[in-house]
Image (cartoon, grey):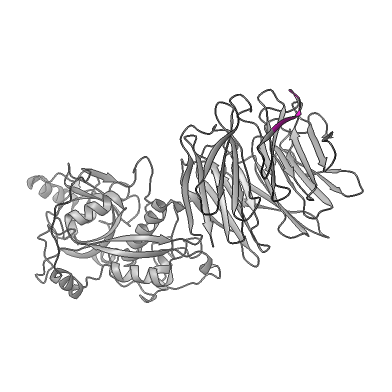
Amino acid sequence: MTIRNISELNAILERSNASWRAVENHMTRMAPEERQRMLGLKVDRKLLSDLAARPRAFSVILGLPTAVDWRNFNGQNHVSPIKNQAQCGSCVSFCVSAALESTTSISGAGMVDLSEADLHFCSNHGANCGGWWPSDAIDEAKRRGVTTEDLFPYPVDASGNVSAICQTNPNRDSQLYRPGSFSTLQTMGERKQWLATRGPVCAAFHVYDDFFGYNGTSIYRHVTGNHAGYHCVEVVGYSDTDSCWIVKNSWGSNWGDDGYFRISYGECGIDDTSQDRDPNGAVNQFPMYGIDGIQTPSAWRAFELSGAGSADPKTRVAAVSRIPGSMELWWIAPNGSVQAAYWYEGGNWQRYELAPQGSAAPGGGIDAVSRIPGSMEVWWVGSNGSIQAAFWYEGGSWQRYELAPAGSASLGGALSAVSRISNSMELWWIGSNGSIQANYWYEGGNWQRYELAPAGSASLSGSIASVSRIPSSMELWWTGANGSIQANFWYEGSSWQRYELAPAGSASINGSISAVSRIPSSMELWWIGGNGSIQAKFWYEGNNWQGYELAPPGSASLSGGLAAVSRISNSMELWWVGSNGSIQANFWYEGGNWQRYELDPAGSASLSGGIAVTARIPGSMELWWVGANGTIRDNYWYG
């Protein structure tokens, strides 16, 4: 039967006791040839015959859950948003890309939006809307990688017409995702075991005319209608209670159940219990394909450094790498203690408590420097508004002292430190009256305190950043009480000079600031805008500061952390807490544009927690941040 009348179809469904119903939608309104272009699976009968001839062990797999759904797997969503392949037989590229996106998210590298056009039109498939088979597409994704949607958006116009062309972005090679390998899943047990333990899979099934009108309210089984073609989709879960697969389609979110559907076990060739047949008489029992591993552009890996509740949700984080083979980290716990962890190459992370309960203001600043390889210095805001400090020299124990008395510092303000030469250290913090307070130390002398900016100059919950781009200069920036970005610079032999870098309202008064000097003649500064954007300024010697917006309004939490590093002289990397609790990132290489990606998905991070980063060697970066549940999370990268 053709789709002539939805009422007639529903009457047939009712008479056959089908649980699902049909509805008129954009698919049913299409002409048959238009609907056929919304499919695109090219069945490889020889491959299916070869698979069927292989000896297999049909063992029952015990202990599998009765239901799995990767849209909510242990509280996390690992399924990318619904897309629309439009009038092009590119469903295989859509289902493979969807599985790659899920695999990337599950790996800990965050959710990514991949370019189906790059896979379909620029591979050995060719620049056309013809069909494909999933394992062939996965092989191509492995061979050449798949780039991101922003580098090659799907070429569809407002009428749904697709331009089957290949476009190669000059930055493509810096943003490639490659599957490690894939597994062919033939039995019900293999499919469910993969879905329960590894992630979503690519699946094929036979489409009949009645399927186009599926309304999303129940579980589809074929009742009536002619053969329409074959289709590739991402299976994101299953339910033994309902005896069905849970499937993501590529016909837009206004089809089915917001773009999804459920299909009964054994229907339309989707698994090995099916008795469905091709119009030529061949039995349809299509395998599913699971993607095993993912190579991401940055090869980020992640782990939990400390458990839930170990970090205050508002704590800032401080880190140093005093020698290439070690890293040190400090943060504030909910009970006001100062917690720490260290790592030496070849060993595991070791935790310790640097200062006991009640020593620190949970929302206050903390920072550290290593002025020489054999020493470290840490400062933090005390619970009474003092500035507390601790130092360590190789071969000795940590020694604590009070640098500034009670009431000296804002309990919610940041602090920043730098060691411009090996025998000196400088520290700045936000005073309890909104001033900028400072202390400096030269070897052989005592700490000397002074006021850099008067009362009312700084936001009491704002941030500070500093750099020393050359040994004879220092530069300092902070959030003004009116949301401006204030600055001060110093050259040896002269006095501090203050200026306003960005006017009132430019910055979130609770947001973070970060700065790097990647080469001696330049500085780069980033901050969280008052509208949740990421704002930036850069300076090259002999020129004025130039500003730009790195991420649009709503990109960042107004009270979240932000951190930057320049691991090599021709690159910079930046991370921040997204407005949805994700970890957002951007990287830049000389000669190219900034490239944004999501390192960890929504809900991962505390909206008011800090971020710290180090690059202990040029080929690595380590990032720490506060999890939504009070953990300390660690992401690391090796180039």
In the picture shown, does residue 236 fall above or below 202? above
Residue 62: give x, y in percent of width and height.
18, 47
Tell me the quarter of the picture where residue 138 sits.
bottom left
Residue 406 colored in magenta in the image: yes
Q: Which quadrant would the C terminus be assigned to in this image?
A: bottom right
Q: Is 587 colored magenta in this rendering?
A: no
Residue 448 falls in image quadrant: top right
Q: Residue at x 19, y 63 (%)?
A: 286
Q: Which x, y percent locates residue 498?
A: 84, 42
Q: Residue furthest left?
A: 15
Residue sitting at 17 percent across and 51 percent down?
61
The extreme front residue here reads 395
Query: Foreground: 75 or 6?
Result: 75
- In the rendered image, the residue lying farthest to the right is 493
Question: Which residues, given as a range, are shown in magenta?
Answer: 400-407
Is 287 located above or below residue 505 in the figure? Answer: below
Q: Nearest the camera: 43 or 66?
A: 66
User: Magenta span: helix, strand or loop, mainly?
Assistant: strand
Which image quadrant: the N terminus? bottom left
